[in-house]
Amino acid sequence: MQHRFFALILVTLCATPALAKGRAVATYTRGGLPNVQAQAAVAVDLTTGEELYVKNADEVRPIASISKLMAMLVVLDRHLELDAPTTMTADDKQIALRGARSRLPVGQTFTNRDLLHAALMASDNRAVPALGRAVGLNPAQLVAAMNAKAKELGMKNTTFEDPVGLNANNRSTPRDLVLMLRAAIHQPLIAEITQKAKYVAHPVGKPGWTIEYTNTDVIARSGRYEVITGKTGYTDLALYCLAIAVKVADAHPVAMVFLGAVGKMTRFGDFSRVTQWLTERKWKARASNL
């Protein structure tokens, strides 16, 4: 009952910007299915592999900063030294051009642990090439490794052309991204970081200088659901995206991917609609077995 209550609250919160602009709020279901607004989506039971909900699940679309999950899988495969220092360079700044404002100044040094949090929680673009460099990969090599990892995971419709997700040719499908979520779940550090609501980083040698990162994932930030891992993304072409694995309906692990949502909060509203639908479906199944 508690999850249902929170789901209804989240739908209301996610709809608030639409109400402010005079647009109708999306109904919870349509035709007996969750009324997902994203252009492509999937929800998969991670225990059984059953696809619980699909909408254009094989449509190839830009995935924006969801790309960073793959970049961090590659970096951690190469035994990143978490407490080793890495200094931000002008090249890191160049790769991040056209992206969101970074809080990692050129010339400042951070631990790789702090940079991982910056990349995965705050989606800081400069952190990604810096971490690639920390494991001996330049940006082109990091991209090549990301594509190789995608192939290894069986992601047949996924390609990367930059390590951070600003390039519209970083493309995938909801079904492919479920495979990447599965890999991220099995990388404990990625799972741990992406579950956090906040994190405080410190430049090396400057303990008084703090940078507080807030998770871009509203679901993880809310604490209302048991998030396993996840990543948000946005560019003008990709629109708003979310890939998330979460425990719902009696702690059942489910992966959900929403690509191409219009409106910053819509992807979270889609999550809430699917979650509420799954929970109610579980109750109905239980009632029929009584």
Image (spheres, rainbow, N blue to C red):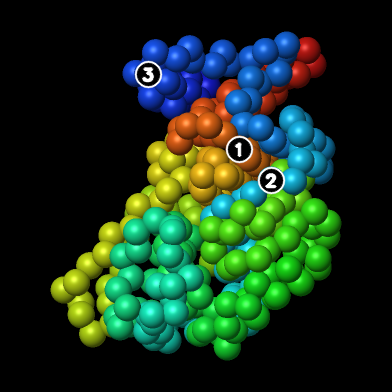
Q: Earlier in the sequence, mark 1 or mark 3?
A: 3
Q: Amino acid at mark 2?
A: Arg
Say above or below: 220 vs 132: above
Say above or below: 86 vs 59: below
Query: Which residue, given by chain and number where applicable, does mark 2 sit on?
Result: 61
> Where residue 108 sits: x, y (%)?
29, 80
Name the residue furthest left. Answer: 208
Compute the Cα span from label 1 to label 2. Answer: 8 Å
Front-lying residue, 237 or 280: 237
Query: Which residue, given by chain and number where applicable, does mark 3 sit on?
Result: 21
Q: Amino acid at mark 3?
A: Lys
Residue 56 seen anywhere in this rendered image of the structure: yes
Q: Earlier in the sequence, mark 2 or mark 3?
A: 3
Q: Earlier in the sequence, mark 1 or mark 2?
A: 2
User: Mark 2 packing: few (<14 Cα in 10 Å), some, or many (20+)?
Assistant: many
Q: Secondary structure at mark 3?
A: loop
Residue drawn at 66 percent across, 32 percent down: 39
Residue drawn at 37 percent across, 18 percent down: 21
Contact between marks 1 and 2 (CB within 8 A): the answer is yes
Residue 40 lies in quadrant: top right
Q: Is 104 positioned to the left or the right of 174 in the image?
A: left
